[in-house]
Image: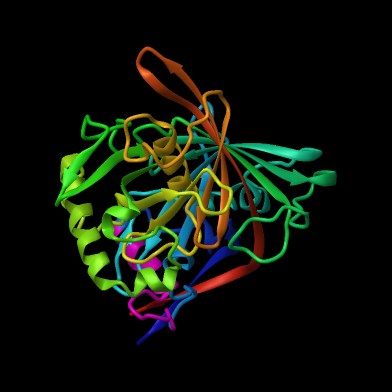
Amino acid sequence: MRTQRGFPYFFMRGGTSRGPYFLRSDLPENQDELAQLLISIVGSGHPLNIDGIGGGDAVTTKVAMLSASDDDWADVDYFFAQVSVESRLVDFAPTCGNILSGVGPAAIEMGLVQPTEETTEIRIRAVNTGARVVSTVQTPQGKVTYRGTAAIDGVPGTAAPVLLKFMDVIGSRTGSLLPTGQLRNEVDGIEVTCMDVAMPMVIARASDFGLSGYEDCATLDADKVFFERMESIRRQAALLMGMGNVEKSVTPKFGLLAPAAAGGTVAARYFMPWSTHPSMAVTGSQCLAVCALTSGTIADGLLERPADSPAPVVLEHASGKIDVLVHFEMGDSGFTLQSAGLLRTARKLAEGTVFAAEV
């Protein structure tokens, strides 16, 4: 007999992604059981996620799980899961900065954090990677508001701003800014920079693949030859980065850079990795921005690097632009990242009980 299990949740848009936000204590502790539960809730295994609340795209099959932190610095622990659209897999290795945009508001809504007047500063530990993030949420009269005038490309309309300041993002997964020990590596005849800032990435020049770097998502997703070559390079680079076999992992992500075409710092395309991101990941934007600012990477010759900190880096992506404010130091050892700041928005879409099928 098929029965249903209900779980309280908030359904939120965070940045340019969306998904369910849960209290971690409401879900199974065992990670295998948790994965099967999330697959059922999202509806993984069907291109439309027709038997769940996913949206048929990787930016709509993400899950946030929150708890009060036992860390002396943090207020909230944020545990992230990337559920696949079709392959019934869950990856707990990465984190997601867009979904993180909704963590502050959700933590207040869940009662994990008490709001203060006008704005509330929430210290978040991303437990998947160990990154520390300070989120500033608009709370006029001590209540979360989602109404505002902030706009981000990839989301229609405006909303209240959520300010994110990322710290401790170097070596998020590999423990090193340059996991291969080099600024550039050659893989299958393509020069890449393997870098780990908030998200481990393999970054290349679009022109080396015969691309302009300005293609839209549909054009890139239809280019099966490019995706096959990119995936081969990604897997080989992951071995060089010490990440092992990543055939079933969404990390490292892949990125392409090209000269700016619309007044930004540099043009970028980001891959999730088996489809093109419709806009830009918050974590990926930090890694791409640091790659752009670091002398000797594949970004050399694609931009004019700012010399002063903080440096605004404007990435032109498939839906517009994203601004990353990078605080850094330049010393004898070169570029040293201190923190990266971004403006995002979030909105509560629904709350209640979501049901998972149980055999």
Rendered image quadrant of residue 136: top right
Q: Residue at x 34, y 54 (%)?
A: 206
Rendering coords of residue 120 (x, y %): 72, 39
Residues drawn in magenta: 32-50
Q: Is residue 213 above or below residue 216?
A: above
Q: Residue at x 16, y 48 (%)?
A: 187
Magenta highlight on residue 37: yes
Task: Decide which of 327, 113 is in the foreground and name it.
Answer: 327
Q: Is residue 144 above or below residue 6?
A: above
Q: Is residue 16 above or below residue 137?
A: below
Rendering coords of residue 339 (x, y %): 51, 30
Task: Decide which of 212, 292 is in the foreground and name it.
Answer: 212
In the image, taking residue 349 as reference, residue 283 lies left or right, namely left
| Residue 30 visible, this angle | no
Q: How many numbered marks have been drawn onto this rendered protein structure? A: 0
| Residue 89 visible, this angle | yes
